[in-house]
Image: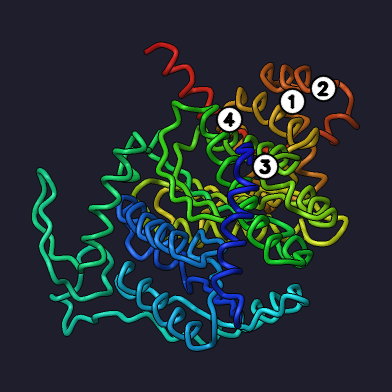
Amino acid sequence: MTNEKAPQQLKDRIRAARRAAEGDPFLVGFDANGIQELITASSRPVAMCGASAMVSAFDTWARDRPGSIFGGGGRGVWLVEGSSAADMARDTLVREYADRTHGGVLACATARLDPARESDSLALLRLRLKNAKDEAPPPRVPLPRSRAEQCAYCRVRAASTTRRPPGAEAHSICARCDDSVERGGTRARTRHEQGQTLEDLALGGRVAAIAADGNSMGVFFAEVGSLMEMAAASQVVDAVFRGAHEAALSEIPEAPRISLVTGGDDILLFLAPDFLLDYVTLLAQKVHEQTRASSGLVTLLGDKLRSSLQRVGIGVGAVVAPFHYPASRLLEYAHDYEKSAKSICRGGDGARSAFDLAVLTSGNELTQGRQHCWAEEIPGAKWSDLRRRASALADIPASQLARLIGTGDLDDVERRNLFRYQVARSAPWQKWFQQIGRDWRSRSQVDEALPDERLVCLAGLERQRQRCAGSRAHG
Protein backbone atom coordinates (compact mmCIF):
# COMPACT_ATOMS: atom_id res chain seq x y z
CA MET A 1 0.00 0.00 0.00
CA THR A 2 3.01 2.29 0.23
CA ASN A 3 3.61 2.15 -3.56
CA GLU A 4 2.63 5.66 -4.59
CA LYS A 5 2.43 4.62 -8.26
CA ALA A 6 -0.13 1.91 -7.52
CA PRO A 7 -3.24 4.17 -7.64
CA GLN A 8 -2.36 5.52 -11.09
CA GLN A 9 -1.46 2.05 -12.36
CA LEU A 10 -4.82 0.73 -11.18
CA LYS A 11 -6.66 3.66 -12.76
CA ASP A 12 -4.85 3.07 -16.04
CA ARG A 13 -5.68 -0.65 -16.03
CA ILE A 14 -9.37 -0.10 -15.34
CA ARG A 15 -9.56 2.70 -17.89
CA ALA A 16 -8.07 0.40 -20.52
CA ALA A 17 -10.49 -2.40 -19.57
CA ARG A 18 -13.44 -0.01 -19.82
CA ARG A 19 -12.38 1.17 -23.27
CA ALA A 20 -12.00 -2.40 -24.52
CA ALA A 21 -15.49 -3.35 -23.27
CA GLU A 22 -17.38 -0.06 -23.68
CA GLY A 23 -19.77 -1.36 -26.36
CA ASP A 24 -21.47 -3.88 -24.04
CA PRO A 25 -19.52 -4.29 -20.78
CA PHE A 26 -19.87 -7.58 -18.88
CA LEU A 27 -18.36 -8.52 -15.54
CA VAL A 28 -16.96 -12.04 -15.06
CA GLY A 29 -16.42 -12.95 -11.42
CA PHE A 30 -14.66 -16.10 -10.22
CA ASP A 31 -13.89 -17.77 -6.90
CA ALA A 32 -12.18 -21.11 -6.24
CA ASN A 33 -14.37 -23.73 -4.57
CA GLY A 34 -12.84 -25.75 -1.75
CA ILE A 35 -9.50 -23.97 -1.81
CA GLN A 36 -8.64 -25.08 1.72
CA GLU A 37 -9.45 -28.69 0.82
CA LEU A 38 -7.23 -28.38 -2.26
CA ILE A 39 -4.29 -27.14 -0.21
CA THR A 40 -4.68 -29.73 2.54
CA ALA A 41 -5.44 -32.68 0.24
CA SER A 42 -2.05 -34.16 1.13
CA SER A 43 -0.84 -34.34 4.72
CA ARG A 44 2.69 -33.49 3.62
CA PRO A 45 3.47 -29.81 4.30
CA VAL A 46 5.77 -29.65 1.28
CA ALA A 47 2.82 -30.71 -0.91
CA MET A 48 0.61 -28.11 0.78
CA CYS A 49 3.18 -25.46 -0.13
CA GLY A 50 3.08 -26.72 -3.69
CA ALA A 51 -0.72 -26.60 -3.83
CA SER A 52 -0.55 -22.99 -2.61
CA ALA A 53 1.93 -22.29 -5.39
CA MET A 54 -0.52 -23.74 -7.94
CA VAL A 55 -3.18 -21.26 -6.84
CA SER A 56 -0.63 -18.42 -6.87
CA ALA A 57 0.39 -19.33 -10.43
CA PHE A 58 -3.26 -19.22 -11.49
CA ASP A 59 -3.65 -15.82 -9.79
CA THR A 60 -0.67 -14.46 -11.73
CA TRP A 61 -2.07 -15.77 -15.01
CA ALA A 62 -5.54 -14.32 -14.30
CA ARG A 63 -4.17 -10.89 -13.29
CA ASP A 64 -2.07 -10.63 -16.43
CA ARG A 65 -4.98 -11.24 -18.85
CA PRO A 66 -6.50 -8.29 -20.77
CA GLY A 67 -9.55 -6.97 -18.97
CA SER A 68 -8.44 -8.15 -15.53
CA ILE A 69 -9.71 -5.87 -12.76
CA PHE A 70 -8.17 -7.77 -9.86
CA GLY A 71 -7.14 -11.29 -8.84
CA GLY A 72 -5.73 -13.08 -5.82
CA GLY A 73 -6.32 -16.11 -3.60
CA GLY A 74 -8.24 -17.89 -6.36
CA ARG A 75 -10.66 -14.96 -6.71
CA GLY A 76 -11.03 -12.13 -9.17
CA VAL A 77 -13.04 -10.14 -11.71
CA TRP A 78 -12.61 -9.56 -15.45
CA LEU A 79 -14.34 -6.99 -17.67
CA VAL A 80 -15.12 -8.06 -21.26
CA GLU A 81 -17.33 -6.89 -24.13
CA GLY A 82 -20.53 -8.79 -24.83
CA SER A 83 -22.29 -11.81 -23.41
CA SER A 84 -20.53 -14.20 -25.81
CA ALA A 85 -17.12 -12.98 -24.66
CA ALA A 86 -18.28 -13.33 -21.04
CA ASP A 87 -19.29 -16.95 -21.65
CA MET A 88 -15.94 -17.65 -23.34
CA ALA A 89 -14.05 -16.01 -20.48
CA ARG A 90 -15.98 -18.10 -17.96
CA ASP A 91 -15.13 -21.31 -19.83
CA THR A 92 -11.48 -20.28 -20.15
CA LEU A 93 -11.18 -19.53 -16.43
CA VAL A 94 -12.79 -22.81 -15.37
CA ARG A 95 -10.59 -24.82 -17.72
CA GLU A 96 -7.38 -22.99 -16.80
CA TYR A 97 -7.93 -23.41 -13.07
CA ALA A 98 -8.76 -27.10 -13.46
CA ASP A 99 -5.63 -27.66 -15.57
CA ARG A 100 -3.32 -25.79 -13.20
CA THR A 101 -4.69 -27.50 -10.07
CA HIS A 102 -5.27 -30.97 -11.52
CA GLY A 103 -9.04 -30.89 -11.33
CA GLY A 104 -9.80 -28.02 -8.96
CA VAL A 105 -13.20 -26.34 -9.30
CA LEU A 106 -13.62 -22.64 -10.04
CA ALA A 107 -17.06 -21.06 -9.66
CA CYS A 108 -17.81 -18.33 -12.21
CA ALA A 109 -20.65 -15.90 -12.79
CA THR A 110 -21.37 -13.04 -15.20
CA ALA A 111 -23.39 -9.82 -15.02
CA ARG A 112 -23.83 -6.88 -17.36
CA LEU A 113 -22.14 -3.73 -16.04
CA ASP A 114 -24.39 -0.66 -16.01
CA PRO A 115 -21.96 2.32 -15.88
CA ALA A 116 -24.69 4.42 -14.29
CA ARG A 117 -25.39 1.85 -11.55
CA GLU A 118 -22.08 0.14 -10.90
CA SER A 119 -22.87 -0.64 -7.26
CA ASP A 120 -26.02 -2.54 -8.27
CA SER A 121 -24.13 -4.42 -11.00
CA LEU A 122 -21.44 -5.51 -8.53
CA ALA A 123 -24.08 -6.57 -5.98
CA LEU A 124 -25.76 -8.70 -8.67
CA LEU A 125 -22.40 -10.28 -9.57
CA ARG A 126 -21.73 -11.15 -5.92
CA LEU A 127 -25.16 -12.78 -5.61
CA ARG A 128 -24.72 -14.80 -8.80
CA LEU A 129 -21.23 -15.85 -7.79
CA LYS A 130 -22.50 -17.05 -4.42
CA ASN A 131 -25.13 -19.15 -6.20
CA ALA A 132 -22.49 -20.47 -8.62
CA LYS A 133 -20.36 -21.63 -5.69
CA ASP A 134 -23.34 -23.44 -4.18
CA GLU A 135 -24.13 -25.13 -7.50
CA ALA A 136 -20.54 -25.92 -8.56
CA PRO A 137 -19.81 -29.56 -9.48
CA PRO A 138 -17.49 -31.73 -7.37
CA PRO A 139 -13.78 -31.86 -8.29
CA ARG A 140 -12.69 -34.14 -11.12
CA VAL A 141 -10.76 -36.85 -9.29
CA PRO A 142 -9.18 -39.90 -11.01
CA LEU A 143 -10.23 -42.58 -8.54
CA PRO A 144 -8.17 -45.77 -8.00
CA ARG A 145 -9.73 -49.11 -8.89
CA SER A 146 -8.16 -50.74 -5.83
CA ARG A 147 -6.29 -49.79 -2.68
CA ALA A 148 -3.05 -50.86 -4.32
CA GLU A 149 -3.54 -48.12 -6.94
CA GLN A 150 -4.08 -45.33 -4.36
CA CYS A 151 -1.74 -42.36 -4.23
CA ALA A 152 0.62 -42.93 -1.30
CA TYR A 153 0.41 -39.23 -0.32
CA CYS A 154 -3.24 -38.09 -0.56
CA ARG A 155 -4.79 -41.60 -0.33
CA VAL A 156 -7.64 -40.46 -2.60
CA ARG A 157 -6.53 -40.24 -6.21
CA ALA A 158 -5.21 -42.93 -8.50
CA ALA A 159 -1.41 -43.13 -8.57
CA SER A 160 0.06 -42.30 -11.96
CA THR A 161 3.78 -41.83 -11.34
CA THR A 162 6.60 -42.87 -9.02
CA ARG A 163 8.57 -40.52 -6.78
CA ARG A 164 11.85 -41.54 -5.16
CA PRO A 165 12.73 -39.17 -2.29
CA PRO A 166 16.46 -39.06 -1.44
CA GLY A 167 17.33 -41.79 1.03
CA ALA A 168 13.78 -43.21 1.07
CA GLU A 169 11.84 -45.89 -0.73
CA ALA A 170 9.89 -45.10 -3.88
CA HIS A 171 6.20 -44.12 -3.66
CA SER A 172 3.44 -44.40 -6.24
CA ILE A 173 1.62 -41.07 -6.24
CA CYS A 174 -0.90 -39.12 -8.30
CA ALA A 175 -0.03 -36.34 -10.74
CA ARG A 176 -1.32 -33.60 -8.44
CA CYS A 177 0.76 -34.72 -5.44
CA ASP A 178 3.81 -35.12 -7.67
CA ASP A 179 3.38 -31.58 -9.01
CA SER A 180 2.64 -30.24 -5.50
CA VAL A 181 5.77 -31.78 -3.96
CA GLU A 182 7.93 -30.45 -6.79
CA ARG A 183 6.51 -26.92 -6.52
CA GLY A 184 6.58 -27.03 -2.72
CA GLY A 185 10.25 -27.94 -2.58
CA THR A 186 11.10 -25.10 -4.93
CA ARG A 187 8.99 -22.64 -2.94
CA ALA A 188 10.53 -23.65 0.39
CA ARG A 189 14.05 -23.24 -1.01
CA THR A 190 13.16 -19.85 -2.48
CA ARG A 191 11.78 -18.64 0.86
CA HIS A 192 14.68 -20.18 2.81
CA GLU A 193 12.20 -21.87 5.13
CA GLN A 194 13.63 -24.29 7.63
CA GLY A 195 11.81 -27.47 6.73
CA GLN A 196 9.41 -29.40 4.55
CA THR A 197 7.97 -31.75 7.17
CA LEU A 198 6.37 -31.14 10.55
CA GLU A 199 9.24 -32.98 12.20
CA ASP A 200 11.59 -30.31 10.85
CA LEU A 201 9.67 -27.69 12.83
CA ALA A 202 9.07 -29.71 16.00
CA LEU A 203 10.35 -28.36 19.28
CA GLY A 204 9.82 -30.63 22.25
CA GLY A 205 8.15 -33.03 19.81
CA ARG A 206 5.31 -30.59 19.01
CA VAL A 207 4.27 -28.19 16.26
CA ALA A 208 1.68 -25.43 15.96
CA ALA A 209 -0.86 -25.31 13.12
CA ILE A 210 -2.40 -21.86 12.58
CA ALA A 211 -5.44 -20.75 10.58
CA ALA A 212 -6.43 -17.08 10.39
CA ASP A 213 -9.14 -15.17 8.57
CA GLY A 214 -10.22 -11.53 8.37
CA ASN A 215 -13.05 -10.15 10.50
CA SER A 216 -15.71 -7.68 9.31
CA MET A 217 -14.90 -8.38 5.66
CA GLY A 218 -18.56 -8.66 4.66
CA VAL A 219 -19.30 -5.25 6.17
CA PHE A 220 -16.24 -3.81 4.43
CA PHE A 221 -17.04 -5.07 0.92
CA ALA A 222 -20.71 -4.16 1.31
CA GLU A 223 -19.57 -0.51 1.17
CA VAL A 224 -18.01 -0.93 -2.31
CA GLY A 225 -19.78 1.40 -4.72
CA SER A 226 -17.80 1.26 -7.96
CA LEU A 227 -15.53 -0.88 -10.10
CA MET A 228 -12.55 1.23 -9.06
CA GLU A 229 -13.37 0.80 -5.38
CA MET A 230 -13.82 -2.95 -5.78
CA ALA A 231 -10.42 -3.32 -7.42
CA ALA A 232 -8.69 -1.06 -4.90
CA ALA A 233 -10.43 -2.64 -1.90
CA SER A 234 -9.45 -6.15 -2.99
CA GLN A 235 -5.80 -5.17 -3.40
CA VAL A 236 -5.80 -3.27 -0.10
CA VAL A 237 -7.14 -6.33 1.76
CA ASP A 238 -4.50 -8.56 0.19
CA ALA A 239 -1.78 -6.06 1.12
CA VAL A 240 -3.05 -5.71 4.71
CA PHE A 241 -3.06 -9.40 5.55
CA ARG A 242 -0.04 -10.46 3.50
CA GLY A 243 1.89 -7.49 4.86
CA ALA A 244 0.84 -8.21 8.45
CA HIS A 245 1.86 -11.87 8.14
CA GLU A 246 5.25 -11.02 6.65
CA ALA A 247 5.88 -8.22 9.15
CA ALA A 248 5.03 -10.50 12.09
CA LEU A 249 7.41 -13.20 10.86
CA SER A 250 10.14 -10.64 10.20
CA GLU A 251 10.22 -9.86 13.94
CA ILE A 252 10.82 -13.54 14.79
CA PRO A 253 13.18 -14.49 11.91
CA GLU A 254 14.62 -17.46 13.79
CA ALA A 255 11.19 -19.14 14.01
CA PRO A 256 10.99 -22.36 11.96
CA ARG A 257 7.87 -22.14 9.79
CA ILE A 258 6.12 -23.46 6.70
CA SER A 259 3.88 -20.73 5.25
CA LEU A 260 0.77 -21.55 3.24
CA VAL A 261 -0.56 -18.04 2.68
CA THR A 262 -3.41 -18.38 0.18
CA GLY A 263 -4.11 -14.71 -0.59
CA GLY A 264 -6.78 -12.23 0.38
CA ASP A 265 -7.53 -12.40 4.10
CA ASP A 266 -6.68 -16.11 4.54
CA ILE A 267 -3.49 -17.23 6.32
CA LEU A 268 -2.34 -20.80 6.96
CA LEU A 269 0.99 -21.87 8.39
CA PHE A 270 2.86 -24.30 10.58
CA LEU A 271 5.18 -22.86 13.19
CA ALA A 272 7.50 -24.01 15.95
CA PRO A 273 5.23 -23.78 19.03
CA ASP A 274 7.48 -21.66 21.22
CA PHE A 275 6.96 -18.78 18.75
CA LEU A 276 3.18 -19.18 18.58
CA LEU A 277 2.09 -16.56 21.12
CA ASP A 278 4.55 -13.97 19.81
CA TYR A 279 3.42 -14.54 16.22
CA VAL A 280 -0.30 -14.34 17.05
CA THR A 281 0.17 -11.15 19.06
CA LEU A 282 2.29 -9.54 16.35
CA LEU A 283 -0.10 -10.61 13.57
CA ALA A 284 -3.09 -8.87 15.18
CA GLN A 285 -1.00 -5.78 15.93
CA LYS A 286 0.23 -5.57 12.34
CA VAL A 287 -3.27 -6.02 10.88
CA HIS A 288 -4.51 -3.12 13.01
CA GLU A 289 -1.52 -1.00 11.98
CA GLN A 290 -1.88 -1.80 8.27
CA THR A 291 -5.57 -0.84 8.22
CA ARG A 292 -4.66 2.65 9.44
CA ALA A 293 -2.68 3.35 6.24
CA SER A 294 -3.76 6.51 4.41
CA SER A 295 -1.62 6.38 1.28
CA GLY A 296 -1.32 4.28 -1.87
CA LEU A 297 -4.42 2.39 -2.97
CA VAL A 298 -6.31 3.48 0.16
CA THR A 299 -6.67 6.92 -1.47
CA LEU A 300 -9.01 5.33 -4.05
CA LEU A 301 -11.47 4.26 -1.35
CA GLY A 302 -14.43 6.40 -0.37
CA ASP A 303 -14.94 7.71 3.15
CA LYS A 304 -17.27 4.85 4.14
CA LEU A 305 -14.80 2.21 2.92
CA ARG A 306 -11.88 3.86 4.71
CA SER A 307 -13.86 3.99 7.93
CA SER A 308 -14.93 0.37 7.52
CA LEU A 309 -11.32 -0.69 6.80
CA GLN A 310 -10.24 0.60 10.20
CA ARG A 311 -12.64 -1.83 11.88
CA VAL A 312 -11.25 -4.86 10.05
CA GLY A 313 -9.48 -7.37 12.31
CA ILE A 314 -8.47 -11.02 12.30
CA GLY A 315 -9.62 -14.24 13.92
CA VAL A 316 -6.84 -16.73 14.67
CA GLY A 317 -7.15 -20.40 15.63
CA ALA A 318 -4.22 -22.62 16.54
CA VAL A 319 -3.55 -26.21 17.53
CA VAL A 320 -0.37 -27.35 19.26
CA ALA A 321 0.16 -31.08 18.84
CA PRO A 322 2.77 -33.82 18.46
CA PHE A 323 4.37 -33.59 15.02
CA HIS A 324 3.27 -37.09 14.02
CA TYR A 325 -0.39 -36.04 13.70
CA PRO A 326 -1.55 -35.62 10.06
CA ALA A 327 -0.88 -32.04 8.96
CA SER A 328 -4.19 -31.76 7.12
CA ARG A 329 -6.15 -32.82 10.21
CA LEU A 330 -4.33 -30.25 12.32
CA LEU A 331 -5.23 -27.47 9.90
CA GLU A 332 -8.85 -28.57 9.84
CA TYR A 333 -8.85 -28.48 13.62
CA ALA A 334 -7.18 -25.04 13.64
CA HIS A 335 -10.02 -23.83 11.40
CA ASP A 336 -12.51 -24.88 14.08
CA TYR A 337 -10.70 -22.70 16.62
CA GLU A 338 -10.46 -19.88 14.10
CA LYS A 339 -14.26 -19.94 13.88
CA SER A 340 -14.46 -19.91 17.68
CA ALA A 341 -12.19 -16.85 17.79
CA LYS A 342 -14.25 -15.08 15.12
CA SER A 343 -17.46 -15.79 17.03
CA ILE A 344 -16.58 -13.21 19.71
CA CYS A 345 -15.85 -10.59 17.04
CA ARG A 346 -19.37 -10.40 15.60
CA GLY A 347 -21.58 -7.41 16.18
CA GLY A 348 -20.80 -3.81 16.92
CA ASP A 349 -19.64 -4.56 20.47
CA GLY A 350 -17.53 -7.58 19.57
CA ALA A 351 -13.75 -7.83 19.69
CA ARG A 352 -11.88 -6.58 16.65
CA SER A 353 -9.43 -9.50 16.69
CA ALA A 354 -9.36 -12.69 18.74
CA PHE A 355 -7.45 -15.92 19.32
CA ASP A 356 -8.45 -19.44 20.34
CA LEU A 357 -6.20 -22.39 21.04
CA ALA A 358 -6.13 -26.13 21.67
CA VAL A 359 -3.23 -28.16 23.02
CA LEU A 360 -3.27 -31.87 22.14
CA THR A 361 -1.31 -34.39 24.15
CA SER A 362 0.44 -37.42 22.68
CA GLY A 363 -1.53 -40.64 22.62
CA ASN A 364 -4.94 -38.95 22.34
CA GLU A 365 -7.20 -38.68 19.34
CA LEU A 366 -7.82 -35.25 17.89
CA THR A 367 -11.15 -35.02 19.68
CA GLN A 368 -9.74 -35.94 23.10
CA GLY A 369 -7.06 -34.85 25.53
CA ARG A 370 -7.12 -31.21 24.49
CA GLN A 371 -6.84 -28.12 26.61
CA HIS A 372 -9.14 -25.39 25.36
CA CYS A 373 -7.92 -21.85 25.78
CA TRP A 374 -11.29 -20.21 25.01
CA ALA A 375 -11.49 -17.27 22.65
CA GLU A 376 -9.64 -14.19 23.87
CA GLU A 377 -9.50 -10.68 22.39
CA ILE A 378 -6.09 -9.69 20.99
CA PRO A 379 -4.01 -7.58 21.23
CA GLY A 380 -4.47 -5.12 24.08
CA ALA A 381 -3.92 -4.65 27.80
CA LYS A 382 -6.00 -7.67 28.83
CA TRP A 383 -4.10 -10.00 26.49
CA SER A 384 -0.74 -8.56 27.58
CA ASP A 385 -1.65 -9.07 31.24
CA LEU A 386 -2.77 -12.63 30.52
CA ARG A 387 0.55 -13.40 28.85
CA ARG A 388 2.49 -11.73 31.68
CA ARG A 389 0.71 -13.84 34.29
CA ALA A 390 1.17 -16.98 32.19
CA SER A 391 4.88 -16.25 31.76
CA ALA A 392 5.31 -15.90 35.52
CA LEU A 393 3.21 -19.03 36.08
CA ALA A 394 5.67 -20.99 33.94
CA ASP A 395 8.00 -21.09 36.97
CA ILE A 396 5.49 -23.17 38.93
CA PRO A 397 6.29 -26.90 38.75
CA ALA A 398 4.18 -28.56 36.08
CA SER A 399 3.10 -31.23 38.55
CA GLN A 400 1.47 -28.60 40.77
CA LEU A 401 -0.33 -27.01 37.83
CA ALA A 402 -1.58 -30.41 36.68
CA ARG A 403 -2.83 -31.15 40.19
CA LEU A 404 -4.63 -27.80 40.26
CA ILE A 405 -6.43 -28.37 36.94
CA GLY A 406 -7.12 -32.04 37.61
CA THR A 407 -9.64 -31.29 40.35
CA GLY A 408 -12.84 -31.55 38.34
CA ASP A 409 -14.37 -33.84 40.95
CA LEU A 410 -14.03 -31.16 43.66
CA ASP A 411 -16.56 -28.45 44.25
CA ASP A 412 -15.52 -24.79 44.12
CA VAL A 413 -14.95 -24.47 47.88
CA GLU A 414 -12.73 -27.56 48.03
CA ARG A 415 -10.76 -26.45 45.00
CA ARG A 416 -10.08 -23.02 46.46
CA ASN A 417 -9.04 -24.56 49.79
CA LEU A 418 -6.58 -26.79 47.91
CA PHE A 419 -5.17 -23.79 46.09
CA ARG A 420 -4.73 -21.79 49.30
CA TYR A 421 -2.90 -24.75 50.83
CA GLN A 422 -0.54 -24.97 47.87
CA VAL A 423 0.18 -21.24 47.97
CA ALA A 424 0.82 -21.22 51.73
CA ARG A 425 3.43 -23.99 51.51
CA SER A 426 5.09 -23.12 48.19
CA ALA A 427 7.71 -20.42 47.63
CA PRO A 428 7.23 -20.51 43.80
CA TRP A 429 3.52 -19.79 44.22
CA GLN A 430 4.27 -16.93 46.61
CA LYS A 431 6.77 -15.50 44.12
CA TRP A 432 4.13 -15.70 41.39
CA PHE A 433 1.72 -13.63 43.48
CA GLN A 434 4.43 -11.03 43.97
CA GLN A 435 5.11 -10.92 40.22
CA ILE A 436 1.47 -10.30 39.37
CA GLY A 437 1.07 -7.69 42.10
CA ARG A 438 -1.17 -9.68 44.46
CA ASP A 439 -0.82 -10.48 48.18
CA TRP A 440 -0.67 -14.24 48.71
CA ARG A 441 -1.58 -13.73 52.39
CA SER A 442 -4.94 -12.22 51.43
CA ARG A 443 -7.64 -14.86 51.11
CA SER A 444 -9.73 -12.74 48.75
CA GLN A 445 -6.75 -12.01 46.47
CA VAL A 446 -5.74 -15.68 46.40
CA ASP A 447 -9.28 -16.68 45.48
CA GLU A 448 -9.45 -14.00 42.80
CA ALA A 449 -6.13 -15.08 41.25
CA LEU A 450 -6.96 -18.80 41.07
CA PRO A 451 -5.56 -19.85 37.65
CA ASP A 452 -8.04 -21.35 35.21
CA GLU A 453 -7.38 -23.91 32.49
CA ARG A 454 -6.73 -21.16 29.94
CA LEU A 455 -3.94 -19.62 32.01
CA VAL A 456 -2.36 -23.01 32.71
CA CYS A 457 -2.48 -23.81 28.99
CA LEU A 458 -0.72 -20.57 28.09
CA ALA A 459 1.80 -21.13 30.90
CA GLY A 460 2.78 -24.42 29.27
CA LEU A 461 3.53 -22.61 26.01
CA GLU A 462 5.42 -19.86 27.83
CA ARG A 463 7.46 -22.49 29.69
CA GLN A 464 8.47 -24.11 26.41
CA ARG A 465 9.26 -20.70 24.88
CA GLN A 466 11.54 -19.82 27.80
CA ARG A 467 13.22 -23.22 27.68
CA CYS A 468 13.90 -22.99 23.93
CA ALA A 469 15.08 -19.37 24.25
CA GLY A 470 17.57 -20.53 26.88
CA SER A 471 18.77 -23.36 24.65
CA ARG A 472 19.32 -20.94 21.74
CA ALA A 473 21.19 -18.53 24.00
CA HIS A 474 23.60 -21.29 25.07
CA GLY A 475 24.14 -22.67 21.81
Residue 424: % across, % down: 76, 22
Q: Earlier in the sequence, mark 4 or mark 1?
A: 1
Residue 296: image tag: 3
Residue farthest toward the top in the current orientation of the protein: 474
> Would you say the residues marked 2 and 1 are in contact, meaning their CB atoms lie under 8 Å apart?
yes
Residue at label 1? 423
Q: Taking the image as drawn, is residue 403 in sight?
A: no
Q: Earlier in the sequence, mark 2 or mark 4?
A: 2
The quadrant in which the N terminus is found is top right
Residue 440: image tag: 2
Q: Earlier in the sequence, mark 3 or mark 4?
A: 3
Q: Label 3: few (<14), some or many (≥20) within 10 Å?
A: some
Mark 3: which secondary structure? helix
Which residue is painted at 67% across and 42% down in the image? 296
Q: CA distance from mark 3 to mark 4?
A: 39 Å
Q: Is residue 88 left or right of residue 214?
A: left
Residue at label 4? 462
